[in-house]
Image (spheres, helix red, strand yellow):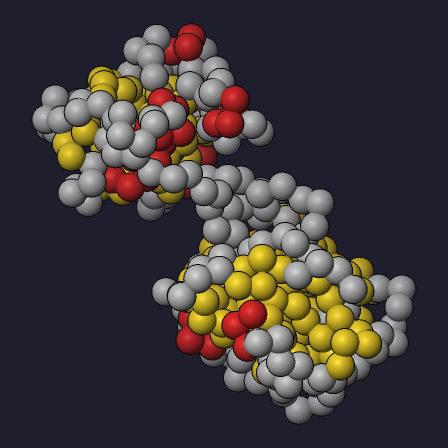
Amino acid sequence: MKYTKITAGLLMGAALLLSACDSDLDNNPTLQTPTTFKLNTPAYANANLDLKTSSALAFSWSQPDYGFPAEVNYQIQLGKSATAADWTTSTDAAGAVENGTANYSNVGDGAKVCKTSVTAKDVATALQQLYKYEEGKVPASQTFYARVRAIYANDTIYSNIVALTATPYYMELSDAEIDEWYLVGGCIGDGGWSNDKDHIGSSILPLYPEPGQTYNKRTGVGILTYTGYFPKGGEFKIIHKAGDWTTQVAGGWKFYEGGNPANMSMSESGYYKITLDPTKKTCTYEKVSKQDPAVYNEIDIAGDFNSWSTTTAMKPVNTYSGAVNHDWYFDIDASAGATKAKFLANQAWTVNWGNTDFPWGAGTQDGSNVSVKAGKWRVLFNDITGQYHFIALK
Protein backbone atom coordinates (compact mmCIF):
# COMPACT_ATOMS: atom_id res chain seq x y z
CA MET A 1 0.00 0.00 0.00
CA LYS A 2 1.42 3.41 -0.99
CA TYR A 3 1.59 6.34 1.43
CA THR A 4 2.24 9.88 0.23
CA LYS A 5 2.22 13.06 2.31
CA ILE A 6 -0.41 15.44 1.04
CA THR A 7 -0.24 19.21 1.20
CA ALA A 8 -2.14 21.31 3.69
CA GLY A 9 -4.01 22.93 0.82
CA LEU A 10 -5.29 19.58 -0.43
CA LEU A 11 -6.32 18.63 3.10
CA MET A 12 -8.25 21.86 3.54
CA GLY A 13 -10.00 21.36 0.20
CA ALA A 14 -10.86 17.79 1.00
CA ALA A 15 -12.32 18.78 4.35
CA LEU A 16 -14.78 21.05 2.60
CA LEU A 17 -16.25 18.31 0.42
CA LEU A 18 -19.88 18.17 1.51
CA SER A 19 -20.55 14.86 -0.19
CA ALA A 20 -17.87 12.87 1.62
CA CYS A 21 -18.86 10.28 4.22
CA ASP A 22 -18.27 10.65 7.95
CA SER A 23 -14.94 9.17 8.97
CA ASP A 24 -12.63 9.19 12.00
CA LEU A 25 -9.38 10.75 10.80
CA ASP A 26 -6.01 11.39 12.41
CA ASN A 27 -4.90 14.98 12.73
CA ASN A 28 -2.13 14.35 10.22
CA PRO A 29 -3.66 12.04 7.57
CA THR A 30 -1.84 10.64 4.57
CA LEU A 31 -3.13 9.84 1.09
CA GLN A 32 -3.69 6.10 0.88
CA THR A 33 -4.70 3.65 -1.84
CA PRO A 34 -7.18 1.20 -0.32
CA THR A 35 -8.08 -2.00 -2.13
CA THR A 36 -11.51 -2.60 -0.58
CA PHE A 37 -14.00 -1.28 2.00
CA LYS A 38 -16.95 -2.58 4.00
CA LEU A 39 -20.56 -2.94 2.87
CA ASN A 40 -22.72 -3.37 5.96
CA THR A 41 -25.02 -6.40 6.10
CA PRO A 42 -28.59 -5.04 5.94
CA ALA A 43 -31.02 -6.04 8.70
CA TYR A 44 -33.29 -7.54 6.03
CA ALA A 45 -30.54 -9.71 4.50
CA ASN A 46 -32.21 -13.00 5.49
CA ALA A 47 -35.79 -11.74 5.68
CA ASN A 48 -36.80 -12.99 2.23
CA LEU A 49 -38.41 -9.65 1.32
CA ASP A 50 -41.38 -9.79 -1.01
CA LEU A 51 -40.18 -7.47 -3.77
CA LYS A 52 -43.69 -7.03 -5.14
CA THR A 53 -44.96 -5.47 -1.89
CA SER A 54 -41.74 -3.77 -0.72
CA SER A 55 -40.84 -0.22 -1.60
CA ALA A 56 -37.06 0.08 -1.31
CA LEU A 57 -33.94 -1.67 -0.03
CA ALA A 58 -31.49 0.44 1.99
CA PHE A 59 -27.71 -0.03 1.87
CA SER A 60 -24.89 1.57 3.85
CA TRP A 61 -21.12 1.19 3.87
CA SER A 62 -17.91 2.72 5.22
CA GLN A 63 -15.83 5.08 3.12
CA PRO A 64 -12.67 3.54 1.67
CA ASP A 65 -9.68 4.63 3.72
CA TYR A 66 -8.13 7.25 1.45
CA GLY A 67 -6.78 9.04 4.50
CA PHE A 68 -9.20 11.96 4.16
CA PRO A 69 -12.90 12.45 3.26
CA ALA A 70 -12.63 12.07 -0.51
CA GLU A 71 -15.45 12.75 -2.97
CA VAL A 72 -16.19 9.22 -4.17
CA ASN A 73 -18.71 7.99 -6.73
CA TYR A 74 -20.50 4.88 -5.47
CA GLN A 75 -22.74 2.37 -7.26
CA ILE A 76 -24.72 -0.57 -5.85
CA GLN A 77 -24.24 -3.79 -7.83
CA LEU A 78 -26.20 -7.05 -7.56
CA GLY A 79 -24.79 -10.35 -8.76
CA LYS A 80 -25.28 -14.12 -8.92
CA SER A 81 -22.13 -15.22 -7.10
CA ALA A 82 -20.39 -14.74 -3.74
CA THR A 83 -17.06 -14.85 -5.60
CA ALA A 84 -15.82 -11.51 -6.98
CA ALA A 85 -14.04 -13.21 -9.90
CA ASP A 86 -17.43 -14.31 -11.24
CA TRP A 87 -18.65 -10.72 -11.67
CA THR A 88 -17.49 -10.31 -15.24
CA THR A 89 -20.40 -9.19 -17.42
CA SER A 90 -22.87 -6.43 -16.64
CA THR A 91 -26.50 -6.40 -17.74
CA ASP A 92 -25.54 -3.09 -19.41
CA ALA A 93 -23.28 -4.92 -21.88
CA ALA A 94 -24.72 -5.25 -25.37
CA GLY A 95 -26.68 -8.48 -25.73
CA ALA A 96 -25.72 -9.76 -22.27
CA VAL A 97 -29.30 -10.06 -21.00
CA GLU A 98 -30.61 -11.55 -24.23
CA ASN A 99 -27.94 -14.24 -24.50
CA GLY A 100 -27.81 -14.98 -20.75
CA THR A 101 -24.17 -14.02 -20.16
CA ALA A 102 -24.88 -11.21 -17.66
CA ASN A 103 -23.83 -12.09 -14.11
CA TYR A 104 -24.18 -8.74 -12.32
CA SER A 105 -26.19 -5.55 -12.62
CA ASN A 106 -25.73 -1.90 -11.63
CA VAL A 107 -28.90 -0.87 -9.79
CA GLY A 108 -30.31 2.45 -8.66
CA ASP A 109 -28.71 5.86 -9.01
CA GLY A 110 -25.10 6.49 -8.14
CA ALA A 111 -24.32 7.99 -4.73
CA LYS A 112 -21.71 10.33 -3.28
CA VAL A 113 -22.43 9.50 0.37
CA CYS A 114 -22.10 6.18 2.16
CA LYS A 115 -25.74 5.15 1.96
CA THR A 116 -28.49 4.85 -0.60
CA SER A 117 -31.78 3.14 -1.32
CA VAL A 118 -32.67 1.05 -4.34
CA THR A 119 -36.31 0.58 -5.31
CA ALA A 120 -37.67 -2.94 -4.96
CA LYS A 121 -38.75 -2.74 -8.59
CA ASP A 122 -35.17 -2.05 -9.69
CA VAL A 123 -34.00 -5.06 -7.68
CA ALA A 124 -36.74 -7.24 -9.19
CA THR A 125 -35.77 -6.06 -12.67
CA ALA A 126 -32.13 -6.91 -12.05
CA LEU A 127 -33.04 -10.41 -10.83
CA GLN A 128 -35.26 -10.97 -13.87
CA GLN A 129 -32.39 -9.93 -16.13
CA LEU A 130 -29.86 -12.12 -14.32
CA TYR A 131 -31.94 -15.24 -13.73
CA LYS A 132 -34.33 -14.95 -16.70
CA TYR A 133 -37.35 -16.38 -14.90
CA GLU A 134 -40.12 -17.91 -16.94
CA GLU A 135 -43.67 -16.84 -16.23
CA GLY A 136 -45.20 -19.19 -13.66
CA LYS A 137 -41.79 -20.59 -12.68
CA VAL A 138 -40.45 -17.90 -10.33
CA PRO A 139 -38.90 -19.29 -7.11
CA ALA A 140 -40.41 -18.43 -3.72
CA SER A 141 -36.96 -17.41 -2.51
CA GLN A 142 -33.88 -16.24 -4.40
CA THR A 143 -30.42 -15.82 -2.91
CA PHE A 144 -28.40 -13.11 -4.62
CA TYR A 145 -25.47 -10.90 -3.73
CA ALA A 146 -24.67 -7.21 -3.31
CA ARG A 147 -21.51 -5.16 -3.35
CA VAL A 148 -20.59 -1.47 -3.82
CA ARG A 149 -18.29 -0.06 -6.50
CA ALA A 150 -16.24 3.02 -5.52
CA ILE A 151 -14.52 5.28 -8.04
CA TYR A 152 -12.07 7.98 -6.94
CA ALA A 153 -9.27 9.64 -8.93
CA ASN A 154 -9.85 7.22 -11.84
CA ASP A 155 -9.29 4.24 -9.53
CA THR A 156 -12.05 1.65 -9.00
CA ILE A 157 -12.32 -0.65 -5.99
CA TYR A 158 -15.10 -2.88 -4.64
CA SER A 159 -16.54 -3.65 -1.23
CA ASN A 160 -17.03 -7.08 0.27
CA ILE A 161 -19.94 -9.13 -1.08
CA VAL A 162 -23.06 -9.61 1.06
CA ALA A 163 -25.68 -12.33 0.54
CA LEU A 164 -29.36 -11.35 0.41
CA THR A 165 -32.62 -13.25 -0.04
CA ALA A 166 -35.89 -12.06 -1.52
CA THR A 167 -39.06 -13.25 -3.18
CA PRO A 168 -38.83 -12.11 -6.82
CA TYR A 169 -41.59 -11.94 -9.38
CA TYR A 170 -41.87 -12.32 -13.12
CA MET A 171 -41.86 -9.20 -15.27
CA GLU A 172 -41.70 -8.50 -18.96
CA LEU A 173 -38.39 -6.78 -19.60
CA SER A 174 -38.30 -3.58 -21.58
CA ASP A 175 -35.63 -0.98 -22.24
CA ALA A 176 -35.54 2.06 -19.99
CA GLU A 177 -37.13 5.24 -21.27
CA ILE A 178 -34.71 7.72 -22.83
CA ASP A 179 -32.95 9.83 -20.20
CA GLU A 180 -34.19 13.25 -21.28
CA TRP A 181 -32.42 16.62 -21.46
CA TYR A 182 -34.42 19.73 -22.30
CA LEU A 183 -33.87 23.04 -24.09
CA VAL A 184 -35.37 26.02 -22.24
CA GLY A 185 -35.00 29.76 -22.74
CA GLY A 186 -36.08 32.96 -24.37
CA CYS A 187 -35.70 31.43 -27.85
CA ILE A 188 -37.24 28.06 -26.98
CA GLY A 189 -40.97 27.28 -27.00
CA ASP A 190 -43.00 30.28 -25.84
CA GLY A 191 -39.84 31.94 -24.50
CA GLY A 192 -41.19 31.89 -20.97
CA TRP A 193 -38.39 29.87 -19.30
CA SER A 194 -40.99 27.60 -17.62
CA ASN A 195 -39.14 24.36 -16.92
CA ASP A 196 -41.75 22.06 -15.33
CA LYS A 197 -43.21 18.88 -16.84
CA ASP A 198 -46.52 20.55 -17.67
CA HIS A 199 -44.67 22.76 -20.17
CA ILE A 200 -42.97 20.01 -22.17
CA GLY A 201 -43.61 21.00 -25.77
CA SER A 202 -44.81 24.51 -24.98
CA SER A 203 -41.89 26.02 -23.05
CA ILE A 204 -39.26 23.28 -22.76
CA LEU A 205 -38.25 21.05 -25.64
CA PRO A 206 -36.64 17.61 -25.21
CA LEU A 207 -33.60 16.90 -27.34
CA TYR A 208 -34.20 13.95 -29.67
CA PRO A 209 -32.63 10.47 -29.58
CA GLU A 210 -30.29 10.16 -32.54
CA PRO A 211 -30.82 7.38 -35.11
CA GLY A 212 -27.86 5.00 -35.17
CA GLN A 213 -26.94 5.61 -31.54
CA THR A 214 -27.36 3.06 -28.75
CA TYR A 215 -28.93 3.84 -25.39
CA ASN A 216 -28.26 2.18 -22.04
CA LYS A 217 -31.05 -0.34 -21.57
CA ARG A 218 -31.10 0.19 -17.79
CA THR A 219 -30.68 3.97 -17.55
CA GLY A 220 -31.74 5.24 -20.99
CA VAL A 221 -28.59 7.38 -21.17
CA GLY A 222 -27.14 8.15 -24.59
CA ILE A 223 -26.37 10.86 -27.15
CA LEU A 224 -29.16 13.35 -27.87
CA THR A 225 -29.39 15.94 -30.62
CA TYR A 226 -31.47 18.89 -31.73
CA THR A 227 -31.56 20.68 -35.08
CA GLY A 228 -33.38 23.98 -35.38
CA TYR A 229 -33.30 27.72 -35.86
CA PHE A 230 -31.66 30.01 -33.28
CA PRO A 231 -31.83 33.80 -33.49
CA LYS A 232 -28.67 35.81 -32.87
CA GLY A 233 -28.28 36.48 -29.16
CA GLY A 234 -31.31 34.39 -28.16
CA GLU A 235 -30.55 32.99 -24.71
CA PHE A 236 -31.15 29.43 -23.57
CA LYS A 237 -29.91 26.57 -21.39
CA ILE A 238 -30.19 22.79 -21.40
CA ILE A 239 -31.51 21.17 -18.21
CA HIS A 240 -31.50 17.52 -17.22
CA LYS A 241 -34.70 17.16 -15.21
CA ALA A 242 -37.97 18.95 -15.93
CA GLY A 243 -38.74 21.24 -13.01
CA ASP A 244 -35.17 21.20 -11.70
CA TRP A 245 -32.37 23.68 -12.45
CA THR A 246 -29.67 21.74 -10.57
CA THR A 247 -27.99 19.91 -13.48
CA GLN A 248 -27.63 21.90 -16.67
CA VAL A 249 -25.51 22.77 -19.68
CA ALA A 250 -24.98 26.52 -19.74
CA GLY A 251 -22.37 29.24 -20.35
CA GLY A 252 -19.36 27.92 -22.24
CA TRP A 253 -21.36 24.83 -23.25
CA LYS A 254 -20.25 23.20 -20.01
CA PHE A 255 -22.01 20.92 -17.51
CA TYR A 256 -22.90 22.49 -14.16
CA GLU A 257 -24.19 21.11 -10.85
CA GLY A 258 -25.98 23.84 -8.92
CA GLY A 259 -25.37 27.58 -8.99
CA ASN A 260 -26.66 29.98 -11.61
CA PRO A 261 -24.34 29.75 -14.63
CA ALA A 262 -24.67 32.15 -17.55
CA ASN A 263 -27.06 31.47 -20.42
CA MET A 264 -25.90 30.31 -23.84
CA SER A 265 -26.57 32.00 -27.19
CA MET A 266 -25.53 31.85 -30.84
CA SER A 267 -23.40 34.64 -32.29
CA GLU A 268 -25.22 34.44 -35.64
CA SER A 269 -28.79 33.66 -36.55
CA GLY A 270 -29.25 30.40 -38.40
CA TYR A 271 -29.82 26.68 -38.22
CA TYR A 272 -27.66 24.69 -35.82
CA LYS A 273 -27.31 21.08 -34.68
CA ILE A 274 -26.65 20.55 -30.98
CA THR A 275 -25.12 17.24 -29.87
CA LEU A 276 -25.14 16.33 -26.18
CA ASP A 277 -23.26 13.34 -24.76
CA PRO A 278 -24.18 12.90 -21.07
CA THR A 279 -21.66 10.07 -20.59
CA LYS A 280 -18.64 12.07 -21.76
CA LYS A 281 -20.20 15.31 -20.45
CA THR A 282 -19.72 17.11 -23.73
CA CYS A 283 -22.11 19.41 -25.57
CA THR A 284 -21.24 20.85 -28.97
CA TYR A 285 -22.96 22.72 -31.78
CA GLU A 286 -22.40 23.20 -35.48
CA LYS A 287 -24.05 25.26 -38.15
CA VAL A 288 -25.91 22.98 -40.55
CA SER A 289 -25.14 23.18 -44.25
CA LYS A 290 -28.73 23.71 -45.36
CA GLN A 291 -29.84 27.09 -44.06
CA ASP A 292 -33.20 27.28 -45.85
CA PRO A 293 -35.25 24.19 -44.95
CA ALA A 294 -38.95 24.22 -45.82
CA VAL A 295 -41.10 26.06 -43.27
CA TYR A 296 -44.58 24.56 -42.89
CA ASN A 297 -47.69 26.38 -41.78
CA GLU A 298 -49.05 23.16 -40.32
CA ILE A 299 -47.90 19.66 -39.49
CA ASP A 300 -50.63 17.07 -39.02
CA ILE A 301 -50.74 13.58 -37.56
CA ALA A 302 -52.89 10.77 -38.92
CA GLY A 303 -53.52 7.18 -37.92
CA ASP A 304 -55.96 4.55 -36.78
CA PHE A 305 -56.76 6.68 -33.74
CA ASN A 306 -58.40 9.38 -35.93
CA SER A 307 -59.49 7.20 -38.89
CA TRP A 308 -56.51 8.54 -40.86
CA SER A 309 -57.90 12.06 -40.99
CA THR A 310 -55.45 14.52 -42.54
CA THR A 311 -56.75 17.51 -40.58
CA THR A 312 -55.55 16.71 -37.05
CA ALA A 313 -53.05 19.52 -36.51
CA MET A 314 -50.09 19.19 -34.17
CA LYS A 315 -49.24 22.19 -31.98
CA PRO A 316 -46.18 24.30 -32.81
CA VAL A 317 -43.48 24.26 -30.12
CA ASN A 318 -41.61 27.49 -30.86
CA THR A 319 -44.01 30.40 -30.61
CA TYR A 320 -41.79 33.13 -29.12
CA SER A 321 -41.68 36.42 -31.00
CA GLY A 322 -39.61 35.95 -34.17
CA ALA A 323 -39.57 32.16 -33.96
CA VAL A 324 -39.05 30.00 -37.04
CA ASN A 325 -40.73 26.80 -35.92
CA HIS A 326 -39.83 23.29 -37.00
CA ASP A 327 -40.98 21.33 -33.93
CA TRP A 328 -44.49 20.11 -33.17
CA TYR A 329 -46.26 18.13 -30.46
CA PHE A 330 -49.51 16.23 -30.00
CA ASP A 331 -51.09 14.04 -27.33
CA ILE A 332 -52.34 10.63 -28.46
CA ASP A 333 -54.71 8.57 -26.34
CA ALA A 334 -54.13 4.97 -27.39
CA SER A 335 -55.13 3.51 -24.03
CA ALA A 336 -57.74 1.35 -25.80
CA GLY A 337 -55.03 -0.41 -27.79
CA ALA A 338 -52.08 -0.08 -30.15
CA THR A 339 -52.45 2.19 -33.18
CA LYS A 340 -50.58 3.34 -36.28
CA ALA A 341 -49.48 6.90 -36.97
CA LYS A 342 -47.77 9.06 -39.56
CA PHE A 343 -46.85 12.74 -39.98
CA LEU A 344 -47.82 14.94 -42.92
CA ALA A 345 -47.54 18.58 -43.94
CA ASN A 346 -50.36 21.04 -44.63
CA GLN A 347 -53.18 18.43 -44.58
CA ALA A 348 -51.84 16.59 -47.63
CA TRP A 349 -49.90 13.39 -48.22
CA THR A 350 -47.59 15.11 -50.72
CA VAL A 351 -45.04 15.57 -47.94
CA ASN A 352 -45.17 12.94 -45.21
CA TRP A 353 -42.89 11.14 -42.79
CA GLY A 354 -42.99 7.59 -41.44
CA ASN A 355 -40.84 4.84 -39.91
CA THR A 356 -41.62 1.60 -38.10
CA ASP A 357 -39.40 2.48 -35.10
CA PHE A 358 -41.08 3.19 -31.76
CA PRO A 359 -41.00 5.06 -29.39
CA TRP A 360 -38.48 7.15 -31.27
CA GLY A 361 -36.93 7.29 -34.69
CA ALA A 362 -36.55 9.41 -37.82
CA GLY A 363 -39.34 9.43 -40.38
CA THR A 364 -38.62 9.50 -44.10
CA GLN A 365 -40.72 10.58 -47.07
CA ASP A 366 -43.39 7.92 -47.76
CA GLY A 367 -41.94 5.78 -44.98
CA SER A 368 -43.83 3.07 -43.13
CA ASN A 369 -46.42 3.75 -40.45
CA VAL A 370 -45.22 4.15 -36.87
CA SER A 371 -46.51 1.27 -34.70
CA VAL A 372 -47.63 3.04 -31.53
CA LYS A 373 -48.04 0.85 -28.45
CA ALA A 374 -51.10 1.09 -26.23
CA GLY A 375 -50.95 3.98 -23.78
CA LYS A 376 -51.10 7.75 -23.59
CA TRP A 377 -48.30 9.57 -25.35
CA ARG A 378 -47.01 13.05 -26.08
CA VAL A 379 -45.22 12.89 -29.42
CA LEU A 380 -42.62 15.48 -30.46
CA PHE A 381 -41.73 15.81 -34.14
CA ASN A 382 -39.02 17.78 -35.98
CA ASP A 383 -39.83 18.50 -39.64
CA ILE A 384 -36.18 19.19 -40.60
CA THR A 385 -34.72 15.85 -39.55
CA GLY A 386 -37.92 13.79 -39.38
CA GLN A 387 -36.98 12.84 -35.80
CA TYR A 388 -39.88 11.94 -33.52
CA HIS A 389 -40.18 10.81 -29.92
CA PHE A 390 -43.23 9.38 -28.17
CA ILE A 391 -43.01 10.16 -24.45
CA ALA A 392 -45.35 8.34 -22.06
CA LEU A 393 -47.85 10.58 -20.26
CA LYS A 394 -48.13 9.61 -16.59
In the picture, measured across the screen, residue 104 lies left or right of residue 180, that is left
- Residue 173 point in image, percent of width and height: 42, 38
Instruction: Tell me, yes or no, if residue 201 can be seen here.
Output: no
| Residue at 66 percent of width and 61 percent of height | 369
| Residue at 68 percent of width and 71 percent of height | 343
Q: Nearer the viewer, residue 341 or 197?
A: 341
Q: Quadrant of residue 122?
A: top left
Count all numbered tags in the image, as a single digit: 0
In the picture, measured across the screen, residue 81 lies left or right of residue 23, that is right
| Residue at 57 percent of width and 76 percent of height | 307
- Residue 215 point in image, percent of width and height: 58, 43
- Residue 356 point in image, percent of width and height: 65, 54
| Residue at 22 percent of width and 23 percent of height | 139
Q: In which quarter of the image is residue 330?
A: bottom right
Instruction: Tell me, yes or no, if residue 288 can be seen here.
Output: yes
User: In the image as oriented, which residue stretches furthest toward the bottom?
Assistant: 321
In the picture, measured across the screen, residue 379 lies left or right of residue 26, that is right
Query: Vertical placement of 47 versus 222: above or below?
Result: above
